[in-house]
């Protein structure tokens, strides 16, 4: 089952412009960590406000990670426009993330530790993926 899901996700990532296999692995794992842990936590806590805050943080982390991975794999080779475009995209992404966090914390008053924990899925993914790839290379 996991093999078939990996293949479908792999095709989706290739169609989405992820040309580097190593980048696809880390993005795929981020999808699994963000959405998988969110689902488990929401089911275990009966969709509590904390679990929904976790989901919101995990989705923000996933969208930011997806965008950064997608953009950097192509802009890193464009020495003239790459740094400027990367800066503009990064600032736009951070502005949108900041607005989303402001709304979640300031307006919706979601539990901040749930949100922070969800945002931390990137750290868990990078650590786990890095350690798993360490033995393969």
Image (spheres, rainbow, N blue to C red):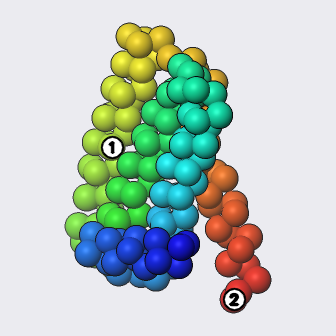
Q: Residue at x 48, y 57 (%)?
A: 31
Q: Is residue 78 above or below residue 99?
A: below
Q: Is residue 70 above or below residue 34?
A: below
Q: Position of residue 113 (x, y in %)?
A: 63, 24
Mark closest to the chain's N terminus, 1 or 2: 1
Q: Position of residue 14 (x, y in %)?
A: 32, 77
Q: Position of residue 46 (x, y in %)?
A: 58, 26
Q: Residue at x 55, y 51 (%)?
A: 36
Q: Residue at x 35, y 56 (%)?
A: 67
Specify whether 106 is left or right of 25: left
Q: Residues within 10 Å of mark 1 (few under 14, many from 20)?
A: some
Q: Position of residue 109 (x, y in %)?
A: 47, 11
Residue 95 in which image quadrant: top left
The residue tagged 1 is 93
In terms of secondary structure, where does tag 1 sit? Answer: helix
Specify whether 130 is left or right of 76: right
Residue 104 seen in render: yes
Residue 84 in which image quadrant: bottom left
The residue tagged 2 is 137
Badge nearest the viewer, 1 or 2: 2
């Amino acid at each position: 089952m996991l093999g078939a899901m990996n293949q479908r996700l792999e095709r989706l990532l290739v169609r989405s412009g992820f040309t580097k296999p190593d980048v696809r692995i880390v993005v795929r794992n981020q999808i699994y960590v963000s959405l998988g842990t969110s689902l488990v936590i929401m089911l275990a806590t009966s969709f509590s406000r904390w679990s929904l805050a976790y989901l919101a943080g995990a989705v923000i982390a996933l969208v930011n990670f997806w965008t950064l991975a997608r953009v950097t794999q192509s802009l890193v080779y464009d020495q003239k426009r790459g740094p400027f475009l990367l800066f503009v995209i990064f600032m736009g992404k951070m502005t949108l993330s900041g607005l989303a966090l402001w709304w979640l914390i300031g307006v919706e008053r979601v539990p901040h530790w749930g949100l922070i924990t969800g945002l931390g899925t990137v750290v868990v993914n990078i650590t786990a993926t890095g350690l798993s790839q360490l033995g393969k290379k």
